[in-house]
């Protein structure tokens, strides 16, 4: 294949013509994945590259089969908290904590200004949910979000794409058929997706089909023009474990599988969003079902949160579910912060949410044999063996917290931590074995005798 510094046409068009854009080469190098294999996976739709035509200063991120599990951090204002400065600080902290992407979910303040500021300050891909802005503007103008016009919905989508958004969540699967399935069963939480609720409300009020589904070709054209990836949203995701794996959820998933195929035919990159709240024993089957129905499309999951009774600790409940989901084949984890279900996250919540989600992602990558994953842990083990504190801090997922924890209980010593002190097992055994690691020394004393002394 020919190598080109940067693609002038769409990424998919370039690859089909035999040209490899620099973005693909960069992902191949970062992921330690064979370039030809990566190209095949992109062309088949099993990997997506997140970087739009208008966000050229962002690092391209690959999501999908055989790649490192990615982590997204949600930021954005609300009606009650509208500080752009705070959201930019959340962006900075998310990047510092090594989030792969961020999503601006703002619903308060000057939404255009907030989104553009986040994009211009973000060196990583940015996602949005354009239906939020369309609904909010309809409420401000007409008094109700159900008064959105179809034309305005698509105008907002195109505005987000033109601003340089790299991927957009679009709730195309909330169809009349999915709503029928929802209303024919008993759910505790009904619809917990904000975008899904907006679309459902509009459809019920207007007695019409979802325009994002009905006019999907129009959406594909926007995605083509701006090189924006579609994240097919799960408006029917379960909002509690009692609602998991029901008819409404899977009715939507079947529709998303149909739309994945249409996106691929149009040369548009697409991934699929998934639950949500799931009991631990249902996670593997849910991932496998998505991969089957959506023909290997990258799977982007929120959590999954595995129990409902741990508010304040839902970053932990989601990490438990996220590890299992990623090991089963999910490709992209959306973080959950400790404040999930309780309020808008703070800057510190964002940092902690990213780190905990990265722990889940890395645990799955280690178990799944992703290139470079186990080597990282081996380097940490070697640093621990050497009692090399600087290297342990540098290699840790959260160097800031690692350094703080070490320094706070250091007690003026560097030859061991204060957990074991002079009884440090690795230090003691290293001294006893010596550099040649002989179990018996020249005097004939065995290791057991030395330790007894």
Image (tube, grey):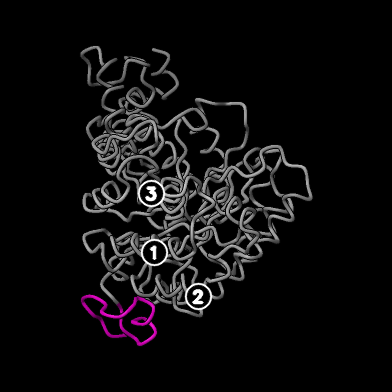
Tell me if mark 1 has few (under 14), some (14-19) or many (20+) residues whose alpha carbon lies within 10 angstroms of its own: some
For the C terminus, give its image quadrant: top left
Q: Please, what secondary structure does the residue beneath circle 3 have?
A: strand
Q: Earlier in the sequence, mark 2 or mark 1?
A: 1
**In what quadrant of the picture does the N terminus appear?**
bottom left
Asked if the residue at tag 1 contacts the one at tag 2, i.e. Cβ–Cβ closer than 8 Å, the answer is no
Q: Residue furthest front?
A: 142
Name the residue beneath numbered marker 3. 103
The residue positioned 46% from the left and 46% from the top of the image is 139
Residue behind mark 1: 155
Q: Do we see residue 435 in this rendering?
A: no
Q: Earlier in the sequence, mark 3 or mark 2?
A: 3
Q: Nearer the viewer, residue 126 or 329?
A: 126
Which of the pair 306/135 is nearer the observer? Answer: 135
In magenta, the rendered stretch is: 1-20
Percent from the top left, x then y, of residue 324? 57, 46
Q: Which residue is mark 2?
A: 217
Q: Report the front residue among 259 and 429.
A: 259
- Residue 440 inside the magenta-drawn segment: no
Is residue 5 among what the camera can see? yes
Q: Give me the C-alpha separation between circle 3 and circle 2.
A: 24 Å
Q: Nearer the viewer, mark 3 or mark 1?
A: 1
**Quadrant location of residue 221?**
bottom left
- Distance between the Cα atoms at labels 2 and 1? 15 Å
Q: Which residue lies at the image location 40% right of the left edge and 45% below the top edge?
A: 105
Location of residue 136 in the rendering, given as x and y in whole percent from the top left corner: 43, 47
At 40% across and 70% down in the image, what residue appears?
Answer: 223
Give the mark count: 3
| Residue visible at 55% across and 70% down in the picture | 260
Q: Quick one: SS at disc 2?
A: helix
**Picture disc at residue 19:** none
Tell me, yes or no, whether the highlighted magenta stretch contains residue 11: yes
């Amino acid at each position: 294949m020919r190598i080109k510094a940067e693609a002038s046409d769409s990424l998919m068009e370039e690859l089909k013509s035999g040209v490899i854009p620099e973005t693909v080469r960069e992902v191949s190098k970062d992921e330690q994945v064979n370039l030809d294999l990566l190209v095949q996976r992109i062309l088949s739709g099993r990997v997506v590259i997140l970087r739009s035509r208008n966000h050229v200063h962002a690092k391209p991120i690959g999501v999908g089969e055989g790649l490192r599990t990615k982590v997204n951090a949600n930021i954005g204002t609300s009606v009650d908290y509208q500080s752009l400065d705070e959201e930019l600080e959340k962006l900075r902290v998310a990047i510092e904590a090594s989030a792969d992407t961020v999503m601006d979910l703002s619903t308060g303040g000057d939404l255009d200004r907030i989104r553009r500021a986040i994009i211009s300050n973000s060196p990583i891909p940015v996602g949005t949910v354009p239906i939020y802005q369309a609904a909010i503007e309809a409420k401000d103008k007409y008094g109700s979000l159900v008064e959105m016009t179809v034309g305005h919905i698509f105008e907002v989508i195109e505005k987000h794409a033109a601003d340089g958004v790299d991927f957009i969540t679009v709730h195309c699967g909330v169809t009349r058929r999915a709503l029928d399935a929802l209303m024919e069963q008993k759910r505790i939480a009904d619809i917990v997706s904000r975008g899904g609720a907006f679309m459902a409300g509009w459809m019920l009020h207007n007695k019409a089909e979802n325009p994002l589904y009905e006019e999907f070709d129009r959406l594909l054209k926007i995605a083509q023009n701006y090189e924006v990836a579609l994240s097919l949203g799960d408006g029917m995701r379960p909002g509690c474990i009692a609602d998991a794996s029901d008819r409404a959820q899977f009715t939507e998933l079947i529709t998303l599988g149909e739309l994945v195929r249409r996106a691929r035919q149009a040369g548009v990159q697409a991934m699929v969003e998934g639950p949500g709240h799931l009991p631990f024993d249902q996670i593997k089957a849910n991932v496998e079902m998505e991969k089957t129905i959506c023909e290997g499309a990258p799977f982007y999951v929120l959590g999954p949160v595995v129990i409902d009774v741990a508010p304040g600790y839902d970053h932990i409940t989601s990490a438990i579910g996220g590890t299992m989901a990623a090991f089963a084949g999910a490709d992209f984890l959306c973080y959950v912060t400790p404040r999930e279900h309780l309020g808008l996250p703070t800057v510190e919540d964002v940092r902690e949410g990213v780190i905990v989600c990265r722990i889940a992602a890395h645990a799955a990558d280690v178990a799944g044999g992703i290139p470079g994953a186990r080597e990282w842990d081996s380097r940490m083990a070697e640093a621990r063996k050497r009692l090399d504190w600087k290297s342990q801090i540098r290699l840790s997922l959260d160097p800031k917290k690692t350094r703080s924890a070490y320094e706070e209980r250091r007690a003026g010593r560097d030859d061991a931590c204060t957990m074991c002190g002079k009884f440090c097992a690795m230090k003691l055994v290293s001294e006893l074995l010596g550099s040649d690691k002989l179990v018996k020394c020249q005097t004939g004393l065995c290791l057991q005798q030395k330790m007894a002394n």
